[in-house]
Image: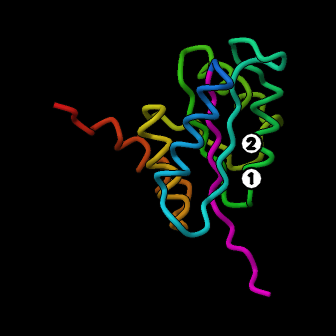
Amino acid sequence: MPERQARVGIVLVSHSREVAQAVAALAAGLAGGGELAPVEAAGGTADGGLGTSAELIAGAARRADRGAGVAVLADLGSAVLTVQAMLAEGDELPRGTRLVDAPFVEGAVAALVTASAGADLAAVAEAAGEAYTYRKT
């Protein structure tokens, strides 16, 4: 049996569970066929409300971790701050977890496509960040 390739995992942190799950589903749908890199949604609070939850983020990062790093994309200010605080603590997220500066939707698609192609964490972060340059007009 072939050994599974270590891939960068993607975690999508939103203030809304529904938004995080929908963006994860959109990214998976647009990423095409083949084996996808793991993508996990961490949206809202533990009771289903709006907000962010360090517990949910940590759980999603653990599930997404396949040994090649975890790219975290966050939607709004306090989601970013929560992830930054967790990274500063140093023991709540898997080793190799990185907060990626990228637009939430476009960045998620670019990150998942790139991670699924087997790219490393730096390339996944770069691809997600490049989504800022997509012009719509």
Residue at 78%, 24% in the rendered image:
54
Q: Amino acid at mark 2?
A: Ala
The numbered dot on residue 61 is 2
Residue nearest the viewer, comparing 72 with 113: 113
Q: Residue furthest bottom?
A: 1
Magenta span contains residue 64: no
Whether 63 is drawn above or below 133: the answer is: below
Separation (CA) of disc 1 from disc 2: 6 Å
> Residue 65's spot in the image, x, y percent?
74, 53
Query: Is 40 on the left or on the right of 102, as rendered?
Result: right
Q: Quadrant of residue 90?
A: top right
> Residue 121's spot in the image, x, y percent?
56, 55
Q: Quadrant of residue 24?
A: top right
Whether 5 is drawn above or below 121: the answer is: below
Q: Amino acid at mark 1?
A: Asp
The residue to which callout 1 is attached is: 65
- Circles 1 and 2: CB distance less than 8 Å? yes
The crowd level at tag 1 (other Cα within 10 Å; few <14, some 14-19, many 20+) is many
Q: Residue furthest left?
A: 137
Image quadrant occupied by the N terminus: bottom right
Residue nearest the viewer, comparing 48 with 108: 48
The crowd level at tag 2 (other Cα within 10 Å; few <14, some 14-19, many 20+) is many
Magenta span contains residue 10: yes
Residue at 61%, 14% in the rendered image:
78
Image quadrant occupied by the C terminus: top left
- In the rendered structure, which segment of residues is drawn in magenta? 1-14
Local secondary structure at mark 2: helix
The numbered dot on residue 86 is none
Query: Is 136 on the left or on the right of 25, as rendered?
Result: left
- The figure's colour scheme reads rainbow
Local secondary structure at mark 1: loop
